[in-house]
């Protein structure tokens, strides 16, 4: 690519040209920001396919930004308030840098996640008050997979390790911190919004979980049995 600025557009997206120019101009004048974007809307048609009668129009997002000064602050906030800066305006060389692991990630959903988290880790993101993107909602559009199907797939854990290791390395360089500290920040960002208990699954922890959260609807594990020292107790605690 030879253009100085770039934005990703899927086949069901319409980007507003004036808003693209505003975002590019902002980045030109604000080198401490990495991306910029405006508001986004969704619409559906009564008919299937790309043409038809308008059925519904609504908000996709209103104000999305990441103005925190440090990578740590941005990552922690982003972990609680995830959105997709993939569709923002970027400097082309920085977009290519953030996309390096996108196509090689075994799991497609982690491809999106690693790009978005790296983008926010590497720099600030600015919201501009303009209509920026319009997206068509239809049955064939890609959506994140069902949580159970996702975490139980063979590609989930290898992709999670790549995601974590890549983000730890990036955060360490951005904020000038050690990788151990960066690793703790990434763990915290992954946990944000999800109740997490660090420890082993045994009778005591199972009783604690049951008393605090109630019975589980789904229990899933990945490569656990091969590393369990007390398999009998772990199976009893699950029951």
Image (spheres, rainbow, N blue to C red):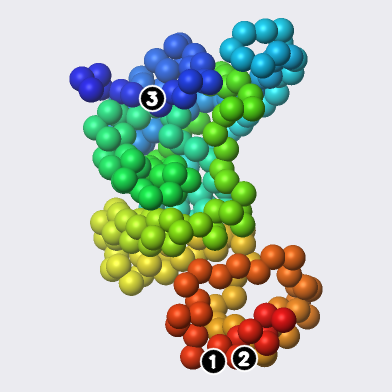
Image position, residue 6 (x, y; %): 33, 24
Query: Could you tell me which residue is drawn at 73 percent across and 70 percent down?
Result: 216
Looking at the rendered image, the disc whose residue lies closer to the viewer, 2 or 3, is 2
Q: Which label's residue is closer to the chain start, 2 or 3? A: 3
Residue at numbered disc 1:
230
**For numbered disc 3, what is the local secondary structure?**
strand
Q: Quadrant of the N terminus?
A: top left
| Residues under numbered marks 1 and 2 in contact, where contact means CB atoms less than 8 Å apart | yes
Q: Quadrant of the C terminus?
A: bottom right
**For numbered disc 1, what is the local secondary structure?**
loop
Residue at numbered disc 3:
7
Image disc number at residue 98: none
Image position, residue 204 (x, y; %): 67, 90
Marks 3/1: CA–CA distance: 52 Å
| Residue 220 in the image: above or below residue 143 | below
Q: Is residue 114 left or right of residue 220?
A: left
Query: Could you tell me which residue is drawn at 61 percent across and 15 percent down?
Result: 49
Q: Is residue 128 left or right of residue 220?
A: left
| Residue 54 in the image: above or below residue 187 | above
Residue at numbered disc 2:
233
Let me know if residue 131 appears in the view.
yes
Image position, residue 169 (x, y; %): 29, 59
Marks 1/2: CA–CA distance: 6 Å
Instruction: Between residue 121 and residue 129, name the one nearer to us.
Output: 121
Q: Which label's residue is closer to the chain start, 3 or 1? A: 3
Let me know if residue 123 appears in the view.
no
Instruction: Between residue 180 and residue 65, name the one nearer to us.
Output: 180
Query: Could you tell me which residue is drawn at 45 percent across and 11 percent down?
Result: 18
Q: Residues within 10 Å of mark 3 (few under 14, many from 20)?
A: some
């Amino acid at each position: 690519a030879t253009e100085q600025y770039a934005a990703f557009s899927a086949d069901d997206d319409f980007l507003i040209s004036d808003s693209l120019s505003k975002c590019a101009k902002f980045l030109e004048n604000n080198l401490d920001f990495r991306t910029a974007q405006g508001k986004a809307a969704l619409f559906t048609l009564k008919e299937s396919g790309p043409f038809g009668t308008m059925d519904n129009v609504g908000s996709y997002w209103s104000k999305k930004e990441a103005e925190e000064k440090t990578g740590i602050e941005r990552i922690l906030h982003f972990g609680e308030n995830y959105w997709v800066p993939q569709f923002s305006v970027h400097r082309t060389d920085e977009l290519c840098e953030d996309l390096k692991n996108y196509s090689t990630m075994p799991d497609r959903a982690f491809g999106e996640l690693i790009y978005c988290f790296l983008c926010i880790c590497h720099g600030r993101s600015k919201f501009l008050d303009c209509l920026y993107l319009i997206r068509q909602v239809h049955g064939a559009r890609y959506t994140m997979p069902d949580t159970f199907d996702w975490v139980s797939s063979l590609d989930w854990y290898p992709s999670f390790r790549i995601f974590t290791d890549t983000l730890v390395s990036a955060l360490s360089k951005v904020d000038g911190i050690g990788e151990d500290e960066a690793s703790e920040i990434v763990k915290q960002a992954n946990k944000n919004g999800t109740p997490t208990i660090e420890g082993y699954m045994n009778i005591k922890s199972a009783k604690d979980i049951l008393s605090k959260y109630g019975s589980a609807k789904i229990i899933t594990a990945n490569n656990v049995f091969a590393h369990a020292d007390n398999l009998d107790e772990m199976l009893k605690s699950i029951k």
